Image (tube, coloured by chain):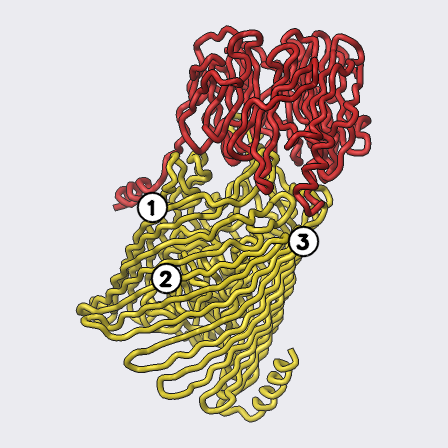
Chain colours: A yellow, B red
């Protein structure tokens, strides 16, 4: 904190003599390849989200990811409710999510809560499907998601406010100082929502429609405070330092199942993150990077009426993770990268657990035959886990190979890899009295493979371009961790067995002139439980389609509009099984979203509507999602 | 084009794997058994004959994850299903057509967790509500009681408040049985946080006035969870598990403490109040008494015992002599939490008692004599309940 404060002061002073004036952060989506892939790994199938789609009022990280090919999101309620991400039918614990390079997945459930990702400070999101990039740690079975914050970019200040349906409101302040050599950005945001949206309650009596009625969701309110600061300093010609501090504190009701809403259960979540990254160019093709980060999370559940079946009026989970590491990338003909990392993490719940881990990873690539490059990555994790008087040590290897080549305008890419996920400390030692641990859990492992073909932009006419991408993928997973409920009511994790997933992802994009873009992502997925016995894998839609239209609003001097963006998109999900027996069905559903963002001199106005058709939506049985909602925001940028 | 799109989207949808409901038309000498098959997320109910044949593979094809059946069979041609937590719904079903005839939610705004249903006469039925509402908006919304239902209108008529019997915990009324003009109600007496308990209690209610007629304290036994009636109706047995402790930090110590409070009490119900014929402590046994309990004959009680995953203890079935108090292990499972319910629908016959075995996916006969394998390995047999088709 001290070092960060010093850098903020230094950069403030440096900003008094700016090299060149810089305005507010980018507003118009960066043009380039319409089917843009993340820069961390050119071989991995994936996509990038940036610009107005990240900033639209009321947008959550779940909203951002839901519209991306190959991605499904599980939301449990309105604004601020727990939400998680899955990629290609993986579990959310198999998808590491990073904010500014710091992993957000906790070691309680293994999942990252997307509702705690501050979209208002993000510059872009990169989604990697199936094959995670070398810099991800760990390489997730499902892929990886990186959220990158706004970089310090000149000197400006912004003050904004948002109002929306169901009592959503927010206000924020953002200020940045700096020049090309050093900069700092600081932001604070306060927000809240009542989330009293209406849903249809059948009273648990589907054969008796007489007692059905519309009810408002209760005890779903939330208030949240979020502070964040990022500093960048170019120490010398070839060296730079980035520092990040982020803190979030949230109070929210725990509404529970719609059938039996909770009245008083509440949750307080706090998270503090401190991270530093350095980057030194040690030659023409040599880069040395280091990083250090510490994250503290605290979740306190208060249940005065014993509505949460916690077997206690309070439950608390504390988590800490501290890590440091570095990487060297070097070589022109044989580019090689080597990275190392040490980490310590601990949780304190009903029982304590801690983990010390070290990781070594290496990557080498070179042109080979007709391939532009062939790459091999390998990692070795050494992990010592202890808790409840027991300790265990394990060594986990992962390996991945990829390659890319071009045939005319078509690029071909392939990936094959084997991955592991060690059980979280919560899975090993328990989360609460009703969610117990199993120290005998084995690691999850899997092998995945995918093959992609994509075209360069093809000109249909002078003003019309199209681009296509298709990926076939498959994954076999073993020793998947699931929770088994005992006759006493508590749940215990166990290794359920194996699953097989296969699918196709199809992306198509078109640009019409300078102002109209069309994109459609489609994912066809087939998941099967390979344990025998006829069970199915629940909550997997066989088809997800995400068409989207983007209009770039040109300057309209008469109305004072400098520029703007309009987006309209629909997400369709086919129906899904709701249980392993395949008895319950979550109906097919969709959501139409439209947004408009306009920049007028120093002011930015934005409007966004969600679920505009008012479709009845569920991601998880018993947790209805909101109906039509409208959000509006204004931001003054100086 | 639009039609093609609709067809493509529809082809990607999945169909429910629940089988079509199928009624029971056959007769059974001593009633039939409904078998709740569940993975505690979803459930279905099959119907079997105690002698080993399937009467209906899917009497009720799709239910939620916490399903119970009444201890005493309801009127002929009816199956009653309790959707316990959190739905709190009573469902009546015509066993011949497998059609739902009525549903009634026995809560308003909190999980009342109904544990048993008992028809006391042609007009009234009782439902024990195990859950307790800390902030009831009306007495009917309080829980911790025996709810009185009108069987004809399928509406709530009133309640018998049992909070006076809370002791140092909460009364938590559980299983019931009717013998003559009395209804015996087992009280679990667990605290709101399930971390403390009071001595088990059996209370008698007059079937006409529903007034309290007797109280029998089960000294030394706590967290009593199961009830069985002897073939002659002269005795009832009560199974007590003891308190499941989660806060000692030592699983071995927790189970040792639990066993001290666990056992089976056999009561002579011909007297008022009922007298305890035999109290068999499980303090010296490996594990505590489970949910399954039945009378193999007038002098022999059979019960399940709980295993423990953390300690590697497995479920078992024991036979207990009422006369001598001797406990004999008659079956041992390979895992914990696989043995569920016990039912003894044909007392005195060669096939006396059966139990659910989730490990094998079957309903097995105690003492050997064959089992009835049920199709499927997802929804496994957990609970049993008698009914008259």
Residue A122 shows in this picture = yes
The percent position of residue B388, horizontal first and vertical second, equals: 53, 11
Mark 3, secondary structure of its residue: strand
Q: Which residue is mark 1?
A: A526
The CA span between labels 2 and 3 is: 35 Å
Badges 1 and 3, same chain? yes
- Which class describes the residues within 10 Å of circle 1: few (<14), some (14-19), or many (20+)? some
The CA span between labels 1 and 2 is: 18 Å
Mark 1, secondary structure of its residue: strand
Dots 1, 3 in contact, CB < 8 A: no
To which quarter of the image does residue B142 belong?
Answer: top right
The percent position of residue A403, horizontal first and vertical second, equals: 27, 67
Q: Is residue A309 left or right of residue B19?
A: right
Q: Which residue is mark 3?
A: A316
Dots 2, 3 in contact, CB < 8 A: no
Q: Is residue B80 above or below residue A219?
A: above
Q: Nearer the viewer, residue A434 or B165?
A: A434
Q: Which residue is mark 2?
A: A131
| Foreground label between 1 and 3 | 3
Q: Is residue A252 above or below residue A117?
A: above
- Chain of the residue under label 1: A
Q: Which mark is residue B150?
A: none
């Amino acid at each position: 904190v001290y070092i960060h404060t010093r850098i903020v002061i230094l950069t403030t002073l440096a900003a008094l003599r700016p090299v060149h004036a810089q305005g507010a952060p980018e507003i118009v989506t960066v043009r380039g390849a319409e089917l843009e892939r993340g820069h961390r790994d050119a071989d991995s199938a994936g996509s990038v989200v940036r610009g107005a789609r990240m900033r639209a009022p009321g947008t959550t990280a779940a909203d951002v990811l839901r519209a991306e090919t190959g991605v499904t999101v599980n939301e449990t309620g309105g604004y601020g409710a727990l939400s998680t991400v899955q990629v290609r039918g993986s579990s959310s614990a198999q998808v590491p999510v990073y904010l500014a390079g710091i992993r957000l997945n906790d070691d309680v459930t293994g999942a990252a809560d997307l509702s705690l990702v501050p979209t208002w400070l993000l510059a872009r999101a990169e989604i990697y499907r199936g094959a995670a990039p070398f810099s991800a740690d760990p390489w997730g079975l499902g892929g990886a998601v990186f959220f990158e914050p706004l970089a310090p970019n000149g000197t400006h200040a912004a003050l904004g406010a948002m109002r929306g349906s169901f009592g959503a409101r927010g206000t924020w302040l953002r200020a940045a100082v700096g020049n090309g050599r050093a900069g700092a950005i600081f932001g604070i945001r306060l927000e809240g929502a009542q989330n009293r949206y209406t849903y249809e309650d059948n009273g648990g009596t589907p054969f008796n429609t007489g007692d059905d009625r519309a009810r408002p969701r209760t005890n779903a309110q939330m208030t949240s405070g979020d502070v964040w600061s990022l500093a960048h300093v170019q120490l010398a010609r070839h060296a730079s330092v980035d520092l990040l501090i982020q803190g979030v504190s949230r109070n929210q009701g725990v509404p529970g199942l719609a059938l039996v809403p909770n009245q008083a259960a509440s949750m307080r979540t706090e998270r503090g993150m401190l991270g530093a990254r350095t980057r030194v160019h040690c030659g023409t093709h040599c880069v040395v990077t280091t990083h250090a980060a510490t994250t503290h999370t605290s979740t306190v559940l208060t249940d005065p009426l014993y509505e949460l079946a916690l077997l206690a009026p309070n439950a608390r989970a504390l988590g800490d993770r501290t890590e440091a590491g570095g990487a060297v990338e070097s070589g022109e003909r044989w580019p090689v990268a080597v990275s190392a990392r040490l980490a310590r993490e601990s949780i304190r719940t009903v029982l304590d657990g801690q983990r010390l881990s070290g990781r070594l990873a290496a990557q080498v690539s070179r042109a080979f035959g007709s391939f532009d490059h062939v790459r091999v990555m390998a990692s070795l994790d050494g992990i010592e886990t202890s808790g409840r008087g027991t300790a265990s040590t394990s060594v986990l290897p992962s390996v991945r190979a990829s390659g890319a080549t071009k045939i005319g305008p078509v690029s071909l890419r392939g990936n094959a890899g084997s991955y592991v996920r060690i059980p979280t400390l919560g899975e090993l030692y328990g989360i609460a009295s009703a969610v117990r641990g199993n120290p005998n859990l084995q690691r999850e492992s899997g092998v995945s493979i995918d093959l992609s073909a994509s075209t360069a932009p093809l000109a249909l006419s002078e003003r019309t371009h199209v681009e296509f991408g298709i990926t076939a993928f498959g994954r076999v997973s073993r020793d998947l961790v699931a929770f088994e409920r005992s006759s006493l009511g508590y749940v215990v994790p166990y290794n359920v067995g194996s699953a097989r997933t296969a699918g196709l992802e199809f992306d198509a994009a078109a640009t019409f002139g300078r102002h109209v873009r069309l994109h459609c992502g489609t994912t066809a997925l087939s998941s099967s439980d390979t344990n025998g016995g006829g069970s199915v894998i629940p909550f997997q839609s066989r088809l997800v389609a995400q068409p989207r239209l983007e209009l770039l609003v040109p300057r309209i001097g008469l109305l004072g509009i400098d520029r703007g963006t309009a987006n309209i998109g629909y997400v369709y999900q086919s129906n899904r099984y709701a249980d392993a027996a395949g008895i319950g069905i979550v109906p097919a559903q969709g959501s139409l979203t439209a947004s408009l963002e306009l920049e007028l001199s120093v002011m930015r106005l934005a409007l966004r509507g969600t679920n505009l058709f008012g479709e009845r939506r569920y991601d998880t049985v018993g947790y209805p999602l909101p109906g039509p909602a409208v959000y509006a925001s204004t931001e003054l940028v100086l | 084009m639009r039609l093609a799109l609709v067809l493509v989207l529809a082809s990607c949808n999945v169909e429910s794997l629940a089988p079509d409901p199928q009624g029971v038309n056959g007769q059974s000498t001593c009633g039939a058994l409904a078998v709740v098959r569940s993975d505690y997320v979803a459930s279905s109910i099959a119907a079997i004959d105690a002698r080993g044949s399937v009467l209906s593979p899917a009497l009720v094809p799709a239910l939620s994850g916490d399903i119970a059946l009444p201890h005493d069979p309801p009127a002929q041609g009816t199956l009653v299903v309790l959707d316990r937590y959190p739905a709190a719904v009573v469902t009546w079903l015509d066993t011949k057509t497998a059609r739902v005839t009525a549903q009634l939610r026995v809560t308003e705004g909190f999980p009342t967790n109904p544990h048993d249903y008992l028809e006391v006469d042609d007009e009234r039925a009782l439902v024990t509500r195990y859950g307790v509402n800390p902030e009831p908006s009306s007495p009917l919304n309080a829980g911790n009681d025996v709810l009185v239902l009108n069987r004809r209108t399928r509406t709530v008529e009133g309640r018998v408040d049992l909070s006076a019997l809370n002791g140092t915990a909460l009364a938590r009324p559980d299983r019931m049985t009717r013998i003559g003009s009395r209804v015996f109600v087992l009280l679990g007496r667990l605290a709101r946080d399930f971390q403390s308990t009071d001595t088990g209690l059996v209370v008698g209610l007059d079937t006409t006035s529903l007034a309290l007629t007797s109280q029998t304290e089960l000294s030394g036994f706590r967290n009593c969870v199961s009830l069985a009636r002897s073939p002659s109706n002269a005795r009832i047995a009560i199974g007590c598990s003891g308190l499941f402790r989660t806060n000692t930090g030592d699983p071995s110590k927790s189970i040792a403490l639990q066993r001290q409070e666990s056992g089976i009490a056999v009561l002579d119900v011909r007297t008022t109040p009922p007298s305890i014929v035999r109290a068999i402590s499980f303090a010296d046994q490996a594990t505590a008494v489970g949910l399954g309990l039945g009378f193999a004959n007038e002098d022999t009680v059979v019960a399940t015992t709980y295993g423990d995953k953390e300690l590697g203890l497995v479920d078992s079935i024991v036979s207990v002599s009422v006369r001598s108090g001797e406990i004999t292990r008659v079956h041992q499972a390979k895992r914990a939490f696989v043995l569920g319910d016990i039912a003894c629908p044909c007392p005195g016959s060669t096939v006396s008692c059966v139990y659910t075995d989730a490990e094998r996916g079957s309903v097995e006969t105690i003492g050997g004599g064959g089992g009835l394998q049920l199709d499927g390995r997802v929804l496994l047999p957990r609970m049993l309940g008698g009914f008259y088709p």
